[in-house]
Image (cartoon, grey):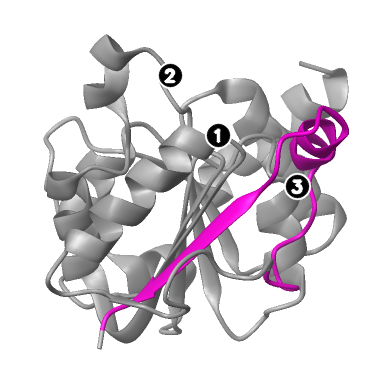
Amino acid sequence: MSSRQTDALDRLWPVYGLDVPERPGTPVDLAGLFGRRAPLVLEIGSGMGDTTAEMAAADPDRDYLAVEVHTPGIANLLDLVDRHGLRNVRVAQGDALDLVAGLAEASLDAVHVFFPDPWPKSRHHKRRIIQPAHVALLRSRLAPGGTLHCATDWAEYAEAMRQTLDADPGLVDAYDGFAPRPTHRPVTKFERRALRAGRPIFDLIHRRP
């Protein structure tokens, strides 16, 4: 980590950070965490945080809870929060599904799963975040009208995601297939690299009626 990121982690983690409880399903006090009640977006796997910070800055009426496991990405997001004066972002470190299990049902306005690890080898598919049991849990935390938005540059995973999301009885495909690229999702460095390498980007947006 850079010295700036290390400093941000030291100073800002006590203010904006949340350790995912070791016991899955431990309740999370969202109003206490953000100091207000507002529609909440859950960002699963926020990486270096650039996308989360940009979306939160453009969307101040909603709160953003980013979940990441890697400390450098968390530190970078905290630095972005500080530099841009964002007050609607909190950062959790740990297993996203353990955190989701502790959220109240219908408490989320949206869930974003952008460019998750595709785990391309067949024997590793069970590690993928988008699979039936996980989708059912995420959907149960969406408020009516809430959206589950996934994006990937891995074609096989995109098709597997589509089939899994379409099979969930409590979700409706907002676009009857892959969605056009939403303007509200920033283009990241990772996405630019994928496009330069000739890999198309797939977006899927499903809604809880």
* Secondary structure beneath label 1: loop
State the separation of the CA atoms marked 2 and 1: 9 Å
Res 191 → quadrant? top right
Residue shown at 36% from the left, 55% from the top: 162
Residue shown at 27% from the left, 82% from the top: 143
In the rendered image, the vertical position of residue 121 relative to residue 183, given as above or below: above
Of the two numbered discs 3 and 2 on the same chain, state the one appearing first in sequence: 3
Of the two numbered discs 2 and 1 on the same chain, state the one appearing first in sequence: 2
Side (left or right) of 195 relative to 36: right
Of the two numbered discs 1 and 3 on the same chain, state the one appearing first in sequence: 3
Numbered label attached to residue 6: none
Mark 3 vs mark 2: in front: 2
Q: Are marks 2 and 1 in contact (CB under 8 Å)?
A: yes
- The magenta region covers 182-208
What is the three-letter code of the residue carrying label 2? Answer: Pro
Is residue 24 in view from this perspective? yes
State the separation of the CA atoms marked 1 and 3: 21 Å
Residue shown at 84% from the left, 40% from the top: 192
Q: For mark 1, what is the residue?
A: 154
What is the three-letter code of the residue carrying label 3? Answer: Asp
Q: For mark 3, what is the residue?
A: 50
Q: For mark 2, what is the residue?
A: 120
Closer-to-camera residue (178/113): 178
